[in-house]
Amino acid sequence: MSSADNNAVMAADNIVITARDLTKSYDGVRVVDGINFDIARGEVFGLLGPNGAGKTTTILMMLGLTEISSGKVGVLGHDPARSPLQVKRRVGYLPDSVGFYDYLTASENLAYTAKLMGLPSADRARRIAVALARVRLSDVADKRVATFSRGMRQRLGLAEIIVKQAEIAILDEPTSGLDPQATLEFLGLIEELKAEGTTVLLSSHLLDQVQRVCDRVALFQSGRVVLMGAVADLARQVLGAGFVVEVEADGAGLARRLATIPGVTNVEALAADRFRMTADRDVRSDAANAVVNANGSLRRLSVDEPSLEAIYARYFQNQTTPSGAARHAA
Amino acid sequence: MRREGSPFQGLGTVALKELADNLSSARMLVLELLIVLTALAALYGAINSLRQNTAEDPFLLLRLFTVDRAPLPSFVAILGFLIPLMAIGLGFDAINSEHSRRTLSRILAQPIYRDALLMGKFLAGLATLAVSLAALWLMVIGLGLIFLGVPPGGEEIARSLAFLVIAVFYAGVWLSLAMLLSVVFRSPATAALVALGTWLFLTVLWPMLAPALAQVIAPPDPRYAMLGLDTPDTAIWAQTLARLSPNHLFGEAMLAVLSPTTRSLGPVFLDQLRGAVMGAPLPLGQSLLIAWPQTVCLIAGTIILFVAGYIVFQRQEVRA
């Protein structure tokens, strides 16, 4: 958690969402249990965790759509429980598997929500056309949503956020159930939003996708944030080191030579000619040099980016070992 | 804790959208056809039987609403039966369909309160019903003009307008019941089934059950029975129980408003009739006074059921 605090050293006026001891309980069961985080303007922040870990509940509390049991959450300086309209005017929300009125066309659906947003009628048509073009739905703008695929619906939901010109976009499981092509497209749109300075809050259980777009992540487990920070920081914290380099080469005393490279903490011989090195930086060029100096022939040199999946797996593995299986069940 | 902003923000938008949906939906078309066709049949019967004695009735137009010719019931009786069906058809999936379509959280993430959504849907439903009833009303008057050829008098129009207003509130009771059920039950099918069950119970079974229950609560006195009379206690209980059904209240109010000779809706004692000119019509104001308690009950029922739905909806979780 310490790295999270380090990351939170940002100017206070730059913080757009802040949660303090945020708790939600249903019938005495704590679904969200005292979580804390700050999200800075322009950041892409990921809420990660298995289904039922409390991600959606956290999001709904930020929007004032569900009551807060205790603690505080502030969005753009407003308390969503007290002034939900202020918050909802400036925050866009794409719910988990978003739905539309099937019997209306894409632009009619957007026109309805644009009216609810209170946009003046002169603005509406223009903003809707622009938003539909951004999410590449212009040619189906006058088609009924009933004919839309899941990916198109998700994009239409994003168009709604663009129409709103939201300062914060909250996306709940935006890519679950999308095919790989649609997922890539959608992640591209999220990156576009980020490039425009929109703060994006993303919840997902698909770790590799989140890793691609998120600046920082918070790992949820049974209603608690168990890890928070940038992926590289988390990797150092949980995996011990950031980079794992695999070398396939032969050469006399290669293992010893590799171990002397500065920054390398461990060398493991997987086979006679294969070594796995753990390092705190990218040591590939040094490894290549070492092989050449040993007059060996280098056949393969690869680096494993620290993957969120590995962090996740390792973290929960570490957790279950000492404290038994109780946590694992959650 | 006080909320900021107006609960009515977005109300007009929601109401207009729902009204457009209602008016253009296939479901509404079917319901309207059903009502118009049955009403036409009832009116045809009424017109045929009225043509034979047009001479001296001062309220010929009103008779169009109330006269029945076997086997068809009167126009008003048909409406009393079918208005609930129409209202239930409009309301039973108001909220739960937003849940199942997964549009609810998206709509509520816009800067509006839940109040606006529920109220907008209710107002749109009520407006739809009012439009349909007004159309039916115009149809009756038009058919009366064409086939009876007697221009309606001012009082007749006033009385038939009172009918229209009371019918809208009667529809309101069923609409708010249907919407309450649409909030309580997540499945539209369950909500529809419960609403239709309530409707059948109150319009078909309750009129039979109420007298039976009254006899249990206040057993008839054999001395009255020997004279061939109803025991007053039993009769009063029977009426009180029957009035629990909005259908009965509507029928009573219609009787008072559309049959100007109606002097009372409860049991009448002989001494109350002293000095009355039997068969003479009451003035409009007096008829409205007789129908007033029933009308108030219908309005109150609408409001109570709506408030119940409102409270449940406010406390409900948005997520599916």
Image (cartoon, coloured by chain):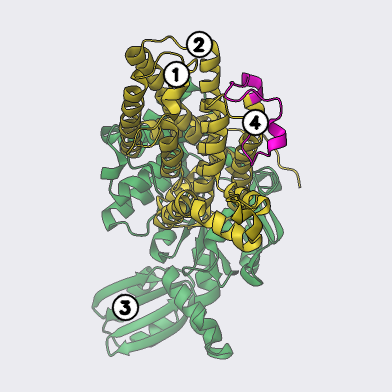
Chain colours: A green, B yellow
| Mark with earlier residue (2, 1) | 1
Check if mark 1 and mark 4 are on a common chain.
yes
Q: Name the amino acid, label 2.
A: Gly
- As measured in the structure, the alpha-carbon distance from the residue carrying label 3 to the one carrying label 1 is 100 Å
Q: Which quarter shows the N terminus of chain A? A: bottom right
- As measured in the structure, the alpha-carbon distance from the residue carrying label 2 to the one carrying label 1 is 9 Å
Residue B153 - label: 2
Query: Which residues lie in the magenta part?
Result: B264-286
Q: Can the viewer see residue A44?
A: no
Circle 3 sits on which residue? A247
Residue B222 - label: none
Please, is residue B302 above or below residue A287 in the view?
above
Q: Name the amino acid, label 1.
A: Leu
Is A118 in front, or is B45? Answer: B45
Q: Residues within 10 Å of mark 1 (few under 14, many from 20)?
A: many
- As measured in the structure, the alpha-carbon distance from the residue carrying label 4 to the one carrying label 3 is 98 Å
- As measured in the structure, the alpha-carbon distance from the residue carrying label 1 to the one carrying label 4 is 21 Å
Circle 4 sits on which residue? B290
Check if mark 2 and mark 4 are on a common chain.
yes
Circle 1 sits on which residue? B61
Please say if the residues under marks 1 and 4 sit with CB atoms less than 8 Å apart. no
